[in-house]
Amino acid sequence: MKNNKYMNWFSMVAILVLALSVTACDDEPDKYEIAGGLPTVKYVRSPLPEVADSLLTGAYMANTVCLVGENLRSIYELYFNDQKAILNTSYITEHTLLIDVPKTIPSKVTDKIYMITRSNDTIAYDFKVLVPTPAVNSMSCEYAKSGSEVTIYGDYFLDDPNVPLKITMPGNIEVTEITNITKTAVSFIVPNNSLDGYINVKSIYGTGRSKFQYMDKRNILFDWDGSHGGIALANGWRKGVVRNSDPEGIDGSYLYFAGAMKGDVGATWAEDQFSFNYWPGFVEEPPMNYPDLSSLPEFAEMIDKYGVNHLQLKFEVYVPTSNPWMSSALQAIFSSNEEVTINTGNNSYFSNTATPRGLWIPWKDSGSYDTGNKWLTVSMKLSEFNKTHDGNKCDNALDKNRMTGLTFFVWNGGVAGTDCNPVICIDNIRVVPVE
């Protein structure tokens, strides 16, 4: 009897512990569980509260939509056309479901959402996935000559068998020779008689206009021969070497940097070979009239209309494969007359950490850079002219008061490279809006 008494007591304890365990396991009453039955979608709307009453019949890829209906927790998988969407149970309730439209273009377009339950039942709902028109963001060389091959970069360059991709150059000149097409890049031969201006690319989903201009003649500051209204010769201690051949120019005369360069950070200070200065306050004999850059009518209008941070510096560059660039940064420095302190014979602003600048170091990731014996277009946003000479963040921002002069100097950059003898050719330095 005694043994049975203790056994009954232990049994009661065990039952109590088990009961407590069961209760503890049930302390997540809101835990997500897939429901049975079938879902019903009444409508699709925007997830934004301010436009929640606007019903949607379609949405662009990667946009978020909200399905509204009944028993939406019964959805186990969901597809837009043939592309599977990612379900996040944190955004699914009995009556609403937030979901991102897949980023991948559907292979088979049915214009439907397919909701699949755990028991493999499929419910369809009419809804279109909208594919954007082509985005034409940049061009390998904006000054590419007729007959040369170029590449434009962007997205949604879709070549449908029934509606082929179409490229139209300025002057309504259609491209007849497309050499390669991917979703994000198209290569083609520049046709004859193309004018300067925007490029249009048309796909089955519509037409997109380029965010740049081919043969862009806007606000050219330096073209080294005056052919586009730019300045033909710099002004300062280093006017730079100007050539018109060897290598062949993209557009007449160009700035030519060349010489030996050490790989150690800041070891090379070669102003004669690798710099040009435009300092309006520099006095020559006899005196010359060199205007402040920011006073040039087109430049002044752009600064006023867009602000410095919505402008970009562009130029064409040529680095031959025979003389790759493997050390130092191209330092692009907009300066005020006071900053240069030219009258005191002092160029210490080159290394003055209070002077913001843009650094271009195209060899940084691979260790070596060349343009494949072609001219290419480079773009540097003025909003990113926030570095010191050694690549650190500058405490000062570039503003319109620092836009009277310009210096290019290949030096330092704060990144160790390799000893080299680069050739760097530059033409058509311009400032244009970021579009």
Image (cartoon, rainbow, N blue to C red):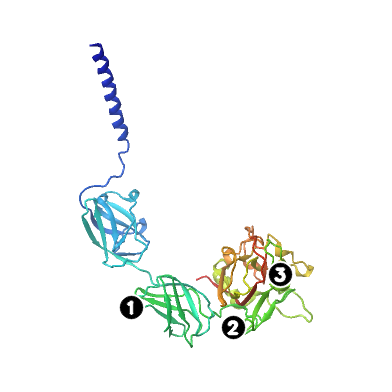
Quadrant hosting residue 430: bottom right
Please indicate whether residue 103 sits to the left or right of residue 274 in the image.
left
Q: Can residue 412 be seen in this view?
A: yes
- Disc with the residue nearer the chain's start (1 vs 2): 1
Residue 269: x and y in percent read 72, 67
Q: Which of marks 2 and 3 is in front?
A: 2
Q: Where is residue 410 in the image (x, y as percent from the top left)?
A: 67, 68
Image quadrant where residue 15 sits: top left
**Nearest the camera: 298 or 60?**
60
Residue situated in front as seen by the camera: 234 or 284: 234
Q: Which mark is residue 251?
A: 2
Task: Determine crowd level at label 2: few under 14, some 14-19, many 20+ residues with C-alpha closer than 10 A.
Answer: some
Mark with earlier residue (3, 1): 1
Instruction: Residue type at mark 2: give it.
Output: Asp
Local secondary structure at mark 2: loop
Q: Furthest-top residue in view?
A: 2
Q: Nearer the viewer, mark 3 or mark 1?
A: 1
Residues at marks 2 and 3, CA–CA distance in whole angstroms: 30 Å
Q: Which residue is the extreme one toward the bottom?
A: 193
Screen quadrant of the N terminus: top left
Q: Identify the amino acid type marked 1.
A: Val
* Image x and y of residue 200, in percent: 43, 78
- Looking at the picture, which amino acid does disc 3 mark? Asn
SS class, disc 3:
helix
Q: Name the residue under label 3.
A: 337
The residues tagged by marks 3 and 1 sit, at their Cα atoms, a distance apart of 56 Å
Circle on res. 163:
1
Residue lying farthest front? 322
- Say whether disc 2 or disc 3 marks the residue closer to the N-terminus: 2
